[in-house]
Amino acid sequence: MIPPSPPVSRCRTQGFAGYNLAWSPFFENKLAVASSANYGLVGNGRLHIMSLGPGAVAPSPGLMVEKMFDTQDGLYDLAWSEAHENQIVTASGDGSIKLWDVALNDHPIRNWAEHTREVFSVDWNNIKKEIFASSSWDCSVKVWHPERKTSLTTIQSHTACVYACAFSPHNPDLLATGSGDGHLRLFDLRQPPTTGVGGGGAVAPPTLEPVATLPVGGEVLCLDWNKYRPLTVATGSTDRGVKVWDLRNAIGGVGKTLSTSLPGRGQMPVAALLGHEYAVRKVAFSPHSANLLASASYDMTARVWDVDAGVQGMASGMPAVGGSGAMRRVYDAHTEFVVGIGWSLFHEGLVASTAWDCETHLWGAMG
Amino acid sequence: MESNQEPILTQDAPTLHQDRDAIFQLLESYDFSDPEFQAGIRSIVGPLQQTGASMDQILETQQRAKVFYFSSKTGHAVSYEEYVEWRGRNRDSAQPTNGQSGGDPIQHDLANVRNKTTTDAATTEPYPASFDSIVELITTGQTDKIPGIKDIPLKINEEEPTAPTLKKPPKPWEKVGAREEEEEESH
């Protein structure tokens, strides 16, 4: 194992526990951090816009807070617009979703209040650049347009908290979700809603049904798509596992729209990366390498994995465990839960992490 | 951190003490603000809260942890069930302990944290408040006692939003020749 080393740079978000971060798709030295006072249990939220000072990555990038926006309730997630360089959307503990123009001050430019409980995840579509998705503890998933007053679509087919949602980077109509019921689901937004049969034979209102449902284990807290391998998704869950799934194995057929899966098909991960000592709170595939994945955990560490080593381990009947070669780096400079992680889109191998220790760190994936 | 937590888990059965009332009173006034307990309770309750557990569940978990920690540290064997039963019996007859004398342990914790904030700020930058005391204030409906919550009414920005001016650079995987495998679907 590689010995611990200090971050390349760190930035305090005094009084606010980090919840997640996002690198700007437009500016190489800009990132944003969503945070909450009092560990997100109660109290205010704060959106931090940070930048790396002159000198870029080496030797001293000087990560610093450029601007802040305060909110009544804690902020749990965020996503930059893929169409507008100044826009960013945040997910809030009071169920609200806010759109910010970071060139302005103080107040959001939009506010939506359709979710009835904590919004835990937001994700902007990388191809259909005018839409984003949200998922909530109210069991619903919604798709939004920044200029519309109400959501475009609501998916009602989950029966537990939906902790994560993410659009495919290759197909704008595919949306994956991770839920407290322990399943990873794939939705095809081109499909018509189906009228299901609810409890006691009552007819449920029409809603979109998943084209694939995979049992992950534990509660699924996070997921991310591989950027180079279509239909490959990683999950992180409360069973401490990081798992990689090939959804091609799980969906029935690939035509104009995807058809519902056959039971039992593709229900096993192609890799299970074990090493975290507590629940895995975030996973992120590298934007530059098909095989690299970063994870953040309640065990106060972030880790970098070589997924291909994990796949080989799985194929030989041995899930990759710490030391077997799949784990490339353990980053342990945080002193609290590490809950947010993201790879720079412009500096290959540069990772940012944010934690409940009220710090955001920059570090190198390979040490 | 692993080595610090070991002793709690491997503690031998503490010796039984006769004066139960005194022990329970000791438990009630025990100072749980030490870093070892605070780190432990965060790692237990944090994930619970994050996964949507009810406040009742959180409160019970927190109380169980306190009883367990108290037993391990002091050697006074107390079970959670026993403590709950004692609390129930004594609630009716107990004197209301408003203010300083008996001392509300939560207020005590918060006061400690505040003091620490002012005295140690330059050296250690402690947490804004104890996680445990925040949980207890929430579960007992005393969120008004949590310091520093600002009232920020929702207001939509009256400034004219900016117009997009930049073309988004391609993502690393969108650059020519970056794709490792052919896509399954075309669109």
Image (spheres, helix red, strand yellow):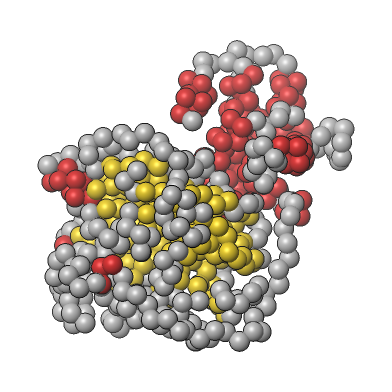
The quadrant of the image that shows the N terminus of chain A is: top left
Along the line of sight, the residue nearer the viewer: B82 or B137? B137
Query: Which residue is the extreme one toward the left?
Result: A316
In this rendering, the answer to whether B72 lies above or below A328 is above
- The residue lying at 73 percent from left, 51 percent from top is B146
In depth, the one of A194 and A186 nearer the eye is A186
**Image height check: is A30 above or below B58?**
below
User: In the rendering, at what x and y percent does residue B148 appear?
Assistant: 74, 55
The part of the image, by quadrant, that contains residue B97 is: top right
Q: Nearer the viewer, residue B91 or A354?
A: A354
Residue B156, placed above or below residue A16: below
Residue at 62 percent across and 14 percent down: it is B16
Q: Residue B69, located in which quarter of the rendered image?
A: top right
Coordinates of residue A97 in the picture (x, y in percent): 54, 72
Q: How many marks?
A: 0
Residue depicted at x 35% and y 64%: A346
- The answer to whether A153 is drawn above or below residue A215 in the figure is below
On the question of residue A238 being in view, the answer is no
- Residue A5 visible here: yes
Q: Is residue B78 left or right of residue A22?
A: right
Q: Give the residue drawn at x 40%, y 57%.
A: A342
**Is B25 left or right of A211, judged from the image as shown?**
right
Residue A322: name its quadrant. top left
* Image location (x, y in percent) of residue A31: 48, 63
Is A101 in front, or is A259? Answer: A101
Q: Quadrant of the image for the C terminus of chain A? A: top left
The image shows residue A278 at horizontal and vertical percentages of: 41, 41
